[in-house]
Image (cartoon, rainbow, N blue to C red):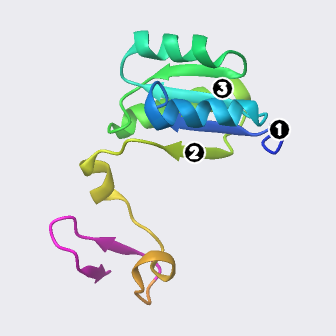
């Protein structure tokens, strides 16, 4: 593996198993320092032991905005910055609250949009 992520910091929610764990392993192998998050501390501890060096675990519920704020405050306190974030499993409540630039994903002419989760239509604000 190369060092394409050398000196980078990544935050991976749901990093204690599945694709999140595999991604964390790959990022560490590429040189990044990785913070993984998850709800169960025991699973996080196993993942940290499996990944090895350059990883830290933060117990947090990624569907809770105050807990996500705490995660990023922890990253800033330990590393001084955060450069990359990779959310893995995403709750439906989080998907509904996300706003994206219109020119990137929704085709609306204004700067922000909201995609309704109950309907597949676009709404411009």
Give the Cα distance between marks 3 and 1.
Answer: 20 Å
Left or right: residue 114 compared with residue 12: left
Q: Are marks 3 and 1 in contact (CB under 8 Å)?
A: no
Q: Magenta span covers which residues?
A: 111-125
Looking at the image, can residue 86 be seen? yes
* Tag shown at residue 37: none
Choose the circle earlier in sequence order: 3 or 2. 3
- Residue at disc 1, secondary structure: loop
Please name the residue shown 48% across and 28% down the image. 37
Which residue bears the numbered disc 2? Answer: 85
> Percent position (x, y) of residue 124?
32, 83
Front-lying residue, 72 or 107: 107
**3D distance between C-alphas at marks 3 and 2:** 16 Å
The overriding secondary structure of the stretch rendered in magenta is loop
Is residue 14 among the parts visible in the rendering? no
Residue most extreme to the front: 1
Question: Where is mark 3, residue-wise?
Answer: 77
The image shows residue 43 at horizontal and vertical percentages of 42, 15
Disc 2 to disc 1, how far (Cα)? 15 Å
- Which picture quadrant has residue 38? top left
Residue for badge 1 = 6
Nearest to N terminus: mark 3 or mark 1: 1
Left or right: residue 54 versus residue 120 is right
Mark 2 or mark 1: whose residue is earlier in sequence = 1
In this view, the mark in front (3 or 1):
1
Q: Quadrant of the C terminus?
A: bottom left
**Where is residue 96 shown, x and y percent of the image?**
27, 58
Q: Residue at x 66, y 35 (%)?
A: 26
Q: Secondary structure at mark 2?
A: strand
Query: How many residues crowd around disc 1 within 10 Å: few (fewer than 14), some, or many (20 or more)?
Result: some
């Amino acid at each position: 593996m190369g060092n394409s992520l050398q000196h980078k910091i990544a935050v991976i929610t749901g990093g204690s198993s599945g694709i999140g764990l595999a991604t964390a392993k790959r990022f560490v192998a590429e040189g990044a320092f990785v913070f993984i998050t998850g709800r169960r501390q025991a699973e996080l501890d196993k993942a940290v032991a499996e990944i090895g060096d350059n990883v830290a675990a933060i117990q947090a519920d990624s569907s809770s905005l105050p807990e996500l704020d705490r995660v990023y405050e922890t990253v800033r306190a330990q590393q001084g910055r955060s450069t990359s974030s990779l959310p893995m499993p995403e709750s439906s409540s989080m998907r509904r609250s996300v706003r994206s630039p219109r020119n990137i994903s929704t085709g609306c002419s204004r700067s922000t949009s909201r995609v309704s989760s109950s309907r597949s239509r676009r709404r411009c604000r």
